[in-house]
Amino acid sequence: MAIYSSVNAASFVARDLGVNTHLGDLYVTTAYGNLGAVQTAMNYLGFSNIRDDVANGELSRMQTLAGYGFHFNIGRDPLWISDADFQSRIDQLQSAHPGAITSVEGMNEVNGWTINYAGLTGIPAAIAEQTWMHNALRADPLFANVPIYNFSLNSFNLSDYQALGNLSSIADEMPLHYYYGGGTPAGAWPTELGFAQAVTPNAAGHVFTEIGSSTAPTDSWGVDETVQAKQTLDAAMDAARTNSRVFFYELADETHNNTYLENNYGLFHGDWSPKPAATALHNLTQILTTGADPNAAPDTFSYSVSGVQFQTWGIGYTAVFEKTANVHDIAVWAEPSLWNGSTHAEVSNTAQPVTISLGATYAAVDVYDPLVGAAALQHLTSVSSVTLNLVDHPLIIEVSNAASSKLATPSARVQPVAARTRPHRAASQ
């Protein structure tokens, strides 16, 4: 029986799940021109965190969204505005809506830029700009305690991160951009964390400020909408098990980039109808937050997981969320290959039995599949273990009110649950 440190379910959804948007003037003719739809989509997801910048008309729209309770990770784009203008704009937003900006991020993917800053270009320019930003914000009472993320790289080579050296003096965390294409999120997750560790070794956690896959299935880097949904659920759970924050790329499809791949990263279509990924995230956040106490004290929870996925394939994962002192959600998932890039088709995976031994008899156990819905698929009473048929995305077992510490009650078996049915970034293959 293993002892796991739980993640506060409500806090995880409120703090660690977010999405990229394009609220600037360049995107007013895309889906993002409808600010009311942005608000509705965010509410549907159950998300409160947005990543964007303030360089080109975003500020007034952010002011509106902040009034509805949304929070922002603000990126620095020196192509459009000066240092003074940047600080002035984020000060305006943070003054009008205290706490609206929860993090500030340096320049975006700087190894692909030719910006001249203080007579420098490339990485030297980014370091100089990051140094200014860090010092200016730490001297600004509005941002004295707000996390400052480093500039990001467009690279999947550890040597590029190691070449930066330890930048902990000017950044709290190294932001990661992870596009797994047809691969599994877990595939290169440890590698990505290693990139961050090379630059900010003292960071308390990790942050993926861009992560996702495109629903352009005939592109070599695209997948279909069902696979995107499974990958998205897996990535959210991978974040929970590794103390990471994720900003999915992106909220809605848009046509600004005029490429098939780039225009289809959205969780929503361009008409704001939800893709299966958006629906799955909606279900997940509903499951995790319904009845959850954001102030529940951190605790530990004992259980064990056994089965083919965990013992033979080596691709099984688990995490536990605390909803209240008496209610815990155990997430169990596997990440086998999901996509055949040659045939542009989903891989059919066979369900495998996995047993969760709870270490006590519980009065109520509910089983959820966020790919299917937000309602429990099965309600069990007085059980000490549950056997699931796991396929390729997370299932959640909600455990309530231990009735006995004895393990005499027979276990319950849950029937199979059938799933309904940018190469400029790092691959996990």
Image (cartoon, rainbow, N blue to C red):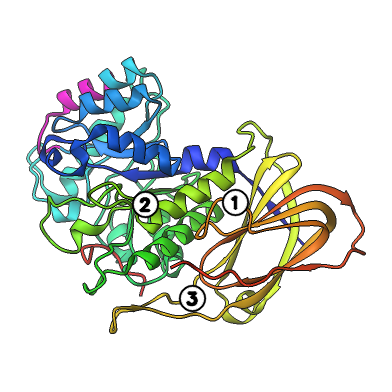
Q: Nearer the viewer, residue 278 or 81?
A: 278
Give SS at disc 1. Answer: loop
Count of numbered marks: 3
Residues packed near mark 3 inside 10 Å, few (<14), some (14 to 19) or many (20 plus): many
Instruction: Identify residue type, mark 3.
Output: Pro
Any part of residue 359 in sight: yes
* Residue 185 point in image, percent of width and height: 42, 65
* Residue 366 point in image, percent of width and height: 70, 54
Is residue 84 within the magenta segment?
yes
Mark 3 or mark 2, earlier in chain: 2
Quadrant of image for the C terminus: bottom left
Give SS at disc 2. Answer: helix
Instruction: Identify residue type, mark 1.
Output: Ala
Q: Nearer the viewer, residue 268 or 199?
A: 268
What's the mark number on residue 375?
Answer: 1
Name the side, left or right, on which 47 lies relative to 396: left
What's the mark number on residue 336?
Answer: 3
Give SS at disc 3. Answer: loop
The region drawn magenta spans 78-91
* Residue 353 point in image, percent of width and height: 66, 76
Is residue 141 within the magenta segment?
no
Which residue in the protein does label 2 denote? 199
